[in-house]
Image (spheres, rainbow, N blue to C red):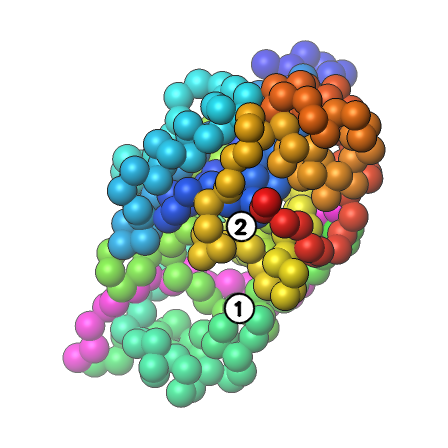
Amino acid sequence: MSSPGTSPAVVGRFAPSPSGPLHIGSLVTAVGSYCLARRQGGRWLVRMEDLDTPRVVAGAAEEILHTLEALGFQWDGEVVRQSRRTAAYEEALEQLRSAGLVFDCACSRKEILASAPHVGEEGPVYPGTCRQGLAGGSQARAQRVRVPAGTLCFTDGVFGAVEQCLAGVVGDFVLRRADGLFAYQLAVVVDDGAAGVNQVVRGADLLSSTPRQIFLQAALGLPVPRYVHLPLALTAEGEKISKRHGPLPLAADGGDILWRVLRFLGQPVPPELRSACAAEVLAWGVGHFDAALIPPADRFLSGD
Ligand code: GLU
């Protein structure tokens, strides 16, 4: 609990999807979220986003945790697994339904694509077909949330002022998918809220998801965390690094890779620390990490 006049303690988190082993792109997020939370004397939680069961790879969650441990990361409390939190998502969906914000949708992907007003950066914008109720005889597939007209704004810790018109860019988005699984957008908001996360540090590929999440936080009566989106690590060809580019090759004990990640994040980690052990490099990050130095530009970062 915070006393009057003091800011609440920082609660940060790292939320990997166990669809493969940790790669250099997710390591950037782990380092940034960890160093920033610890530098502020805060807590750092780990949550396995294993909600999208068809994409979960057996053993990947344990492998990610093992790699984090080997690099010297220490998390607070138990690791939360989204696959065990269905009841909480169910409850949030009901809360939104009671507020009149949820509607059943019978549209297939193909139908949406055919009638979408335009294809935005997030895919086809939902055309509103089922907003006023299902057409006679059609079967509900997914559940969507009604988004308001108007622009949603927030200030990101790296990218500055961001604004998005949800209705124009994404439209009424899915909360529960046709396969019955809860959507990432709902789960992340429910989980961050339940864990008291007040500082979200993650890759800039999620910058455009943030307005959807802020909208859901408001609708569920949850506080809005501070957002810090990190530049994306790119391959030499300029592609975003993903699990497809292979696991992290952990040479020796990983000090070198942590050193390069800190440099990538704009931190002036001394050259002589490059050959230090992982724990020592991470300790430098915890002692010195400065979000103001993070450059808002995606660039090359080699994993080996
Ligand atoms: N699970 C997401 C990912 O691995 C991150 C979600 C988040 O940090 O909000 O990309």
Query: What's the residue at 27%, 73% (across, down)?
Result: 106
Q: Which residues are magenta?
A: 137-158
Instruction: Name the outermost residue toward the left.
Output: 137
Task: Say which quarter of the image contains residue 279.
Answer: top right
Residue 53 picture location, percent across and down: 28, 49
- Going by the numbered disc 1, the residue's amino acid type is Glu
The residue that mark 1 highlights is 122
Query: What's the residue at 63%, 21% (across, down)?
Result: 277
Q: Residues within 10 Å of mark 2 (few under 14, many from 20)?
A: some
The residue that mark 2 highlights is 213
Instruction: Name the outermost residue toward the bottom.
Output: 114
Residue 18 picture location, percent across and down: 38, 43
Query: What's the residue at 45%, 79% (across, down)?
Result: 127
Task: Point out the tag, 2 or 1, that comes first from the N-terminus.
Answer: 1
Which is more toward the observer, 12 or 246?
246
> Can residue 37 be seen at all in this image of the molecule?
no
- Going by the numbered disc 2, the residue's amino acid type is Gln
> Which quadrant is home to the C terminus?
top right
